[in-house]
Amino acid sequence: EDDADEDETSDNDSEFVINSGGNMSPTEAYAAMSDEEFEAHIPQINSITLVGRVGQDPQARYFDDGKVVLRLGLAVKRKYHPLERRALNIKYGEEDTDWFNLELWGRDAEYAEKFVTKGARVGVTGTLNVDAWEDRMTSEERTSVKVIVKHIDILETKAEAEMRRGRSNQGGSYGNESGGSGEGGGYGSDNQEGGGYGSGGGGGSFFDD
């Protein structure tokens, strides 16, 4: 059995020597590669994970071919190390909030429309996508960044959701919707020249926990 393992290892070594073009070590083989060859060996990964609160009540859009899409704004509060807070003089509750445009399709869109409400804390995983189009008024090229959601989870219990809705009904801080999500609009209309995804303003008051 040991001899068989040794033969298999020897075969693998020989295969590498042939592929590398000689008696080259792995380090030497990679060093001899061109930039294009080296890039071909490096995995290209486009993945983003976010946890935040939904900026508005979901309203899916259904197409004649049966497809369904849902667009949302997600507010994500920035996290700071205690030393950063001290250096930048940032107090708790005064953190900046980043807004992300989300796009969900199919079952994820239907699930979010049914179970997700404005202010809900959710976690999403997806890919970052940049859309480009020409502005009809100025003929300038415009771009907008969105996250194509592949998976969404609701990160609050039923009791937490009911408490959140109770605070909102009493005039709480959830649902501050002044402003848009991103410079120059985004995907509020079919020609992509509208005002974002209907998300709220960039202040920190969207969160109160």
Image: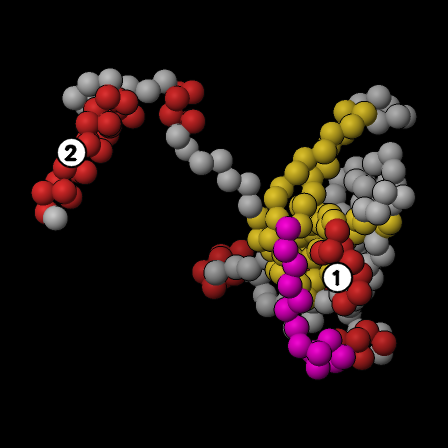
Quarter assignment of residue 21: top left
Q: Amino acid at mark 1?
A: Tyr
Q: x%, y% of residue 3?
A: 9, 43
- For the residue pair 153 and 138, the one nearer the viewer reads as 153
Q: Amino acid at mark 2?
A: Ser
How far apart are the alpha carbons under marks 1 and 2?
Answer: 53 Å
- For the residue pair 41 and 161, the one nearer the viewer reads as 41
The residue carrying mark 2 is 10
Picture layout, residue 182 above or below residue 121: above
Q: x%, y% of residue 41?
A: 39, 30
Quarter assignment of residue 194: top right
Contact, mark 1 vs mark 2 (Cβ under 8 Å): no
Q: Is residue 159 left or right of residue 179?
A: left
Q: Residue at x 14, y 42 (%)?
A: 4
Q: x%, y% of residue 68?
A: 81, 49
The residue carrying mark 1 is 111
